[in-house]
Amino acid sequence: MSISSRLSVGIHILALIEINKDGVSSSQFLAGSVNANPAMIRKIMGMLKKAGLIEVHPGIAGAKLAKELSDITMLDVYKAVNVVQDNELFSLHENPNPECPVGRNIQNAIEPFFSAAQLAMEKVLENVKLENVVRDILNKENII
């Protein structure tokens, strides 16, 4: 089991919109790069638009970034695409047996570790900008 791929797809979409800023970044074009269904791309683009990360206009093909690369963090994208609900990266199993000493105490014993792990991951995402991702892609392609 893994976390939803919406985060990586959201980052992919934003990076491609920036790198293709002189072209038309339609859902069809973006879907070709992601190798996904254009309807799924439109759904994620809707989430990115709602979060204020991209601008799209009905009836006009293409999208553009709504913010500067240096103003978009991976945490912004993570939150935009609803990978998980707040503080729910790790789920606790429901209804452990209260008659068992482990079942009675497991949730309280592990919840602090789960919360700390989520906060640490979010801190890392907060410190990585879309600008870093785009620069890395361009470097790997010898474009800059």
Image: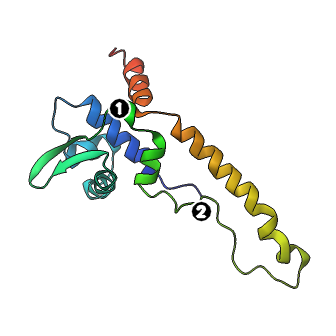
Disc 2: CA contacts within 10 A as few (<14), some (14-19) or many (>=20): few
Residue 135 image position (x, y, % from top left): 40, 23
Residue plotted at (35% across, 32% down): 69
Residue 117 image position (x, y, % from top left): 68, 50
Whether residue 9 sits left or right of residue 105 in the image: it is left
Residue 110 image position (x, y, % from top left): 78, 62
Location of residue 37 (image quadrant): bottom left
Whether residue 86 sits left or right of residue 38 in the image: it is right
From what the image shows, is residue 132 above or below residue 41?
A: above
Residue plotted at (38% across, 30% down): 70
Q: Nearer the viewer, residue 112 or 94?
A: 112
From what the image shows, is residue 23 above or below residue 142?
A: below
> Which secondary structure, mark 1?
helix
| Mark positioned earlier in the residue sequence (1 or 2) | 1
CA–CA distance between discs 1 and 2? 28 Å
Residue 9 image position (x, y, % from top left): 39, 46
Location of residue 98 (image quadrant): bottom right
The residue tagged 2 is 88
Disc 1: CA contacts within 10 A as few (<14), some (14-19) or many (>=20): some
From what the image shows, is residue 108 above or below residue 125?
A: below
Question: Residue 69, which numbered label?
Answer: 1
Q: Amino acid at mark 2?
A: Glu
